[in-house]
Image (tube, rainbow, N blue to C red):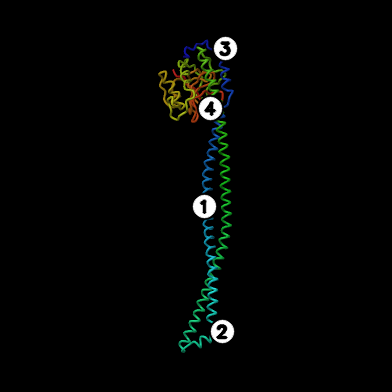
Amino acid sequence: MLVGFSSTRRKAPALVIAFAAFVAATAVSASADSVASKQAEAQSVLAQIQQLDVTLEQAVEAYDGANVKLARIKHDESMNGRNLVVAKRSLKNAQRQLSSRLIDLYTSEGQDSTLAVLLGSTSLNDLLDRMDAADRVSQQDALVLRQVVSLRREIQRRQHELAHAHAVQASVVAQRAAAKASVESQLGQRRALLGSIRGEIVHLQAEERARQAQLQQQAEQQLAAAPTVTAAPGLSQSVGVGPAISAPPSKYGGVVGIAMRYLGTPYVWGGASPSGFDCSGFTMYVYAQVGVSLPHNAAAQFGMGVPVSRSDLQPGDLVFFYGLGHVGLYIGGGSFIHAPHTGDVVKISSLSGGYASAYYGARRIL
């Protein structure tokens, strides 16, 4: 455990150099920020893919609908074609029948049909009946002929309209197919991009794991080699704790070794166990291992212990960021261990990196 800090700790130049090297090592790689950036980009691309999926579904439905309509038009064309054939056949039959009946009506054994009607009549009434029947037959045949001709014209008109509708609908189908193909192409591109981003994320995460392993090894070596610890070199006064005070030496430096056992543990919102931690759950759990009870809330933890200036930080101190929105555990050398955010794991970060501007203050648990 890192206990028993004395006033002579500032006289250990070798240790100061070691810690300076440790700080430099933590600042060498920006892979953690790169991973976060790529993950944000992946989320953005994923949102685009989801929107394209919706658009594609709509495009597919429009394409299918256009094809259904075209199929109906083709069916109507087919039926109309058959009806036209029937109408033409009926017209020919009617023409033949009409011609035959006209011949029978107006010619009889080479005589004029009118004479046949007159001479064949047995009485005046019979004559009138024969003339009326002949007229009715003529009218009926003429009606049949007009109906057949009208039907033929109607079918031809409809055939023309259907042919036009077919051409128009085929164009619509082609447009819908092009729209569908366009969305599918965009979707393919975005999915390929997402795949490449994910591959890059995996690569960056591997680099980050290697960096974290190196930081962990360095921290463990320094914890094992140094019975005393210098203050964090070159750090300015905290902005969140007021004037600098002379805080009693930390007696909980040993929690750093406990905290490092959980490097790589996934972040879990509300988590406070080795199966997953959030930021305050992590510091609460670590301190509970040495018999200290902390609340599960960063702002509430800021009310514990005593304030300590940033220039006097010692291993075991709680460090706060983002207006008490985040808390971690200072491990020395200008670095701290914490559970950052959803999608990340317990890791070591530098106070001189991206967290410098977000730094709020620190507390020392007594």
The quadrant of the image that shows the C terminus is: top left
Give whichever of discs 1 and 3 has the lower sequence position: 3
SS under mark 4:
loop
- Cα–Cα gap, marks 1 and 3: 78 Å
Amino acid bearing label 3: Ala
Which residue was labeled with disc 1? 65
- Nearer to us of marks 2 and 3 is 2
Give whichever of discs 4 and 3 has the lower sequence position: 3
- Cα–Cα gap, marks 4 and 3: 30 Å
| Mark 4 surroundings within 10 Å by alpha-carbon count, few (fewer than 14), some (14 through 19), many (20 or more) | some
Which residue was labeled with disc 4? 358
Amino acid bearing label 2: Gly
| Mark 3 surroundings within 10 Å by alpha-carbon count, few (fewer than 14), some (14 through 19), many (20 or more) | few
| Mark 1 surroundings within 10 Å by alpha-carbon count, few (fewer than 14), some (14 through 19), many (20 or more) | some
- Residue 81, above or below 38: below
SS under mark 1:
helix
- Cα–Cα gap, marks 2 and 1: 66 Å
Which residue was labeled with disc 3? 14
- Nearer to us of marks 2 and 1 is 2
- Residue 109, above or below 23: below
Give whichever of discs 2 and 1 has the lower sequence position: 1
- Residue 53, above or below 328: below
Position in image of residue 109 (x %, y %):
54, 84
- Cα–Cα gap, marks 4 and 2: 121 Å
Amino acid bearing label 4: Ala
